[in-house]
Image (spheres, rainbow, N blue to C red):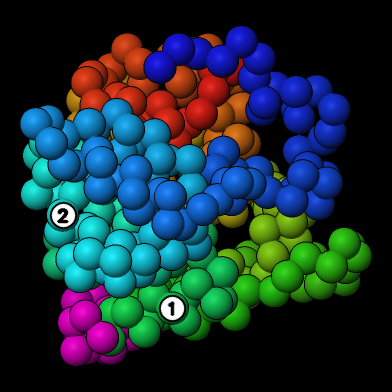
Amino acid sequence: MSPMKSSLAEEILQQLPLAEKTAVWGTLGTIRPHLSFDVERDVQSLLQAVSGEGVHCEAILDLLTSRSDDQRQQIVEEFLDFTKQDLLKTLVAAVPVDLEAVVVGLLKPKAQIDAHEIKDALEAFETETLTEILSTRTKQQLREILDFYKHDFKSDLETDIGLRTSGFLRDLLVALVQGNRERYTGVIDYVLIKQDTKALTEDCGGDVQRPKESEWIRVLTQRSPEHLNRVFSCYHNSTGWRIEDAVEKYFQGIDRESGLTLVSVLQNTPLYFATKLYHALKGPGSSLKTVVRIMISRSESDLLSIRAEFKKHFGVSLYSLIGMDTKGDFRLALLGLCRAEDL
């Protein structure tokens, strides 16, 4: 797969400020519904790819990474109706082991993947992953995650959070699960900015200055990111502390980790994911599982913005780094999701 000569992300960024692009383009994802989608033809293509002497992984990956999540779910249903076989099981049995996670991520509903990621993160106590997923999903997506979680694990997510966590972290995660974040209306409410800033600066009293954790949770989980970034600026002007410095100062251990993750996501979601991808590809604790999760989960929402932030902050395109640091069909899958080089 060769790099595309022109970068779609670069063209968009040259024409529009970051905040305006979604309204004009409709999506900042690299994957959009295939215009000439024909579910029966796609099923036949997949059957041909897994039949015969050899499995054509490139054909499988090219098709799956060129269809939206909704279209892939239609393919799954049509494949079952036509063959009486489960497409996911068929492909997992056919492809190499290193492609299993990609195939599963592409064919299972996104909310179901999130539910399983959350379950794994709870059991492994991966607070950053929990905070990241729960803070970057819409209210509707959170409802779907809760439904899959209850169906697949016969358990309630809020109950499990209460059993596995405590204190600030428990209350923060439960608040995020409830999905009460306000939508940005475009109106700047200066009175509310001052009120929220005051809520973050008030302490509980006593000999040791401690923030009112309930107020931090309320503000950070209910206000829109656009509003919160103005609150963070006001907080800095009032206290001399950046908001992340305050989290470092007032919170400890896993509470600090989850707080820093949430603040980073709220300040600049694409930059958060770009940084996460860079360290997952290059860092000492590199994790291809993390790469797959982010590339698939953001492919239809803001992967173009993530690519732009990646190139801006790390001096290399995400497409190029994937090409250098991965190999084989796994590399083809990730490049298919990335779609293009950023020049």
Mark on residue 291? none
Side of 293 where 181 appears, left or right: right
Q: What percent of the width, then of the height, locates residue 97?
A: 9, 39
**Label annotation for residue 90:** 2
Residue nearest the viewer, comparing 124 with 148: 148
The residue nearer to you, when weighing 220 against 275, is: 275
Residue 151 position (above or below residue 211): below
- The mark total stands at 2
The magenta region covers 151-168
Residue type, numbered disc 2: Thr
Q: Are marks 1 and 2 in contact (CB under 8 Å)?
A: no
Residue visible at 12% across and 30% down in the picture: 54
Q: Earlier in the sequence, mark 1 or mark 2?
A: 2
Quadrant position of residue 153 = bottom left
Q: Which residue lies under the disc numbered 1?
A: 144
Q: Amino acid at mark 1?
A: Glu
Q: Is residue 295 magenta?
A: no
